[in-house]
Amino acid sequence: MNDHSKETTLRPMMKVSEMVPYLKNKNIKFELITEEEAEKYLRDNNNYYNITAYKYNFERYFINGQFVDRFIDLDFAYLKDLAIIDHRIRLLFFKMIIDIEHYLKIRILNLIELINEEDGYRIVNMYLAQDFNDKKFPKKIHNSIFKKVGSEYYQKIFSKYDMDKDKKLENIPVWEFLEIITFGDLVNFYDFFAKEYQLKKEIKNVFILREIVKLRNAVAHNSCVLCDLDKKDNKYAPDYKIVNYLNDCGIGKDARNHKLSNSRIRQMTYTLYMFNEIVTSVGVKRNVVKDIKELFYERIILHKEYYNNNELLQSIYAYFDKIIKNHYNVNID
């Protein structure tokens, strides 16, 4: 029998007209943008949940041994500015991750050509057999493929295969298989492939790519990436490749550990590293360098005075500034 003695009190939905007074109660100011302009922005351009997600990047009052939900030197204009920057950053990193995914597929195909016992079918059949018989998550990849085959594009690719859902998939050529799986499954397949053929150099990339998958999922679903940047939610030691990468930028151990303990900063760092490692097209690289420079040295600093008293955001900007100047600030020949 369900216990109805304890009823949950649901918080009532806040109307747009109630949001500005609510924010003012948290000591958020409306000096650089009027209350009317802020209300219009909340109604037409963004929602309350998204715009206020950035508030914890700013200093709060510390009373009786704990932080309270009242902010020091925070104007609504700062939140609006961060929301716009966040949107631009998501677009940039999504573009970079799509390129990483594309060139990872090319890398796998090129590696397969160098393996004598590999015909482009063997490794896929092995991977699908493992998936079919997996005790914990049987047919995970199979089911993902069946779902995708519903689209006209993928039906054309798989029209030559028997897509009976009761049958184990097999004999899908790797060049077609790579086009039907998700980025997360691509990284899992890359891991399986590298371990099967003992490709140690490739295995070391998997851990980095798994972090990039998390960022890809966030930006693809328009999740904020610039919120909770002071949160320490990742204690795993970084790969030595990342350590060397950051050392080359003049970022020492303390700064490295401090920044990479935040999951979002770690994911963006790993994406910046892997893009240059795996993308081979000079044109693609040149285009991304242009986008990074425009975003980082024009749009992000457009209202840099908003953050004069924000040590957290200033230190994060300085951290990425070192990476960009060392790895994205050169002319590509």
Image (tube, rainbow, N blue to C red):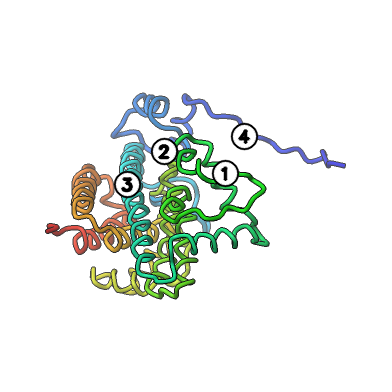
Near mark 3 (Cα within 10 A), the count class, few <14, some 14-19 or many ≥20, is some
Contact flag, marks 3 and 4 (Cβ < 8 Å): no
Q: Is residue 98 above or below residue 36?
A: below
Q: CA distance from mark 2 to mark 3?
A: 23 Å
Query: Is 47 located above or below residue 286 in the figure?
Result: above
Mark 3, residue position: 95
Secondary structure of the residue carrying tag 3 is helix
Q: Position of residue 25 (x, y in %)?
A: 47, 37
> Please, is residue 171 above or below residue 53 in the view?
below
Q: Of the residues tagged 1 and 4, which is closer to the observer?
A: 1
Q: Earlier in the sequence, mark 2 or mark 3?
A: 2
Query: On the image, numbered disc 2 is attached to which residue?
Result: 51
- How far apart are labels 3 and 4 at the CA level? 38 Å
Q: Residues within 10 Å of mark 1 (few under 14, many from 20)?
A: some
Task: Indicate which disc, 1 or 3, sits on the residue closer to the N terminus.
Answer: 3
Residue 304 location in percent, x, y? 23, 47
The kind of secondary structure element at disc 1 is helix
Of badges 1 and 2, the one in the foreground is: 1
Relative side of 9 to 282, left or right: right
Q: Quadrant of residue 204?
A: bottom left
* Residue 282 image label: none
Q: Are marks 1 and 3 in contact (CB under 8 Å)?
A: no
Name the quarter where the C terminus is drawn. bottom left
